[in-house]
Amino acid sequence: MSTRLGVATLTLMLSCMSLAAQEESGMVKLVDFDEVSPEPWFVVNDGVMGGRSTSTLRLSAPGVAVFEGTLSLENNGGFASVRAGLSAAALAGATRILLRVRGDGKRYQLRLRPGRRMDGIAFGRSFETIAGQWTIVELAIESFEPTFRGYRPRSVPPLDPADAGQVGLMLTDKQEGDFRLEIDWIGFCRHDGPCASPPIG
């Protein structure tokens, strides 16, 4: 089931301002939650397959969003997700994705999807969380794997980050029950050296 969220207070900053200054510090901010979002987030849960999982994305504190809900395995369900559109070539040249999150000990996925279609092949990379603790996760673009409706398709070329038209978060892998993931920001680097993240404060 796909639902458009009313998230006027959420921000999706798409790297249009002061990119050079950000890259000097190592990281370009892709998603932030400090200002009004020009792109809405969408919920896409297993209701599209008859499942009963629920999720939402909302502000939990100034500048921090929370992806939360309940994962249900009923009716062959088992995934909950949110996603938002990216501006054209927003991730061009990206080598790594970074995100600052505080989770619940469950394993989540960051997903990048070529184009703006709701369906089709997506590229995902799982990451672990530590319950109640803020962590900075770093994911190499080359580690993102193609997936389509729970299966890994063959003969799919590697992800070209310049083609990424959507970014999203997903919970799956039969992790039944309530979940909660707070997100401070999502960013990326365009080089292979040390990638400095924004100061925490």
Image (cartoon, grey):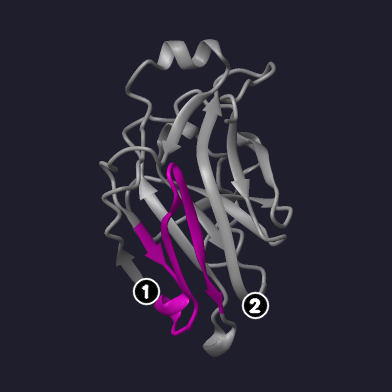
Q: The residue tagged with tag 1: helix, strand or loop?
A: loop
**Which residue is the site of mark 1?**
1
The image shows residue 40 at horizontal and vertical percentages of 29, 51
**Which residue is the site of mark 2?**
176
Report if residue 117 lies within the magenta region. Answer: no
Camera-side residue of 122 and 23: 23
Q: How many marks?
A: 2
- Three-letter code for the amino acid on which mark 1 is drawn: Met
Write the residue at 67% across / 72% down: 175
**Is 39 left or right of 31, judged from the image as shown?**
left
Write the residue at 72% across / 57% down: 131
Q: Nearer the viewer, mark 2 or mark 1?
A: 2
- The circle on residue 42 is none
Q: Which residues are magenta?
A: 42-71
**Is 36 left or right of 111, judged from the image as shown?**
left
Report if residue 64 lies within the magenta region. Answer: yes
For the C terminus, the quadrant is top right
In this view, 83 is above or below 38: below
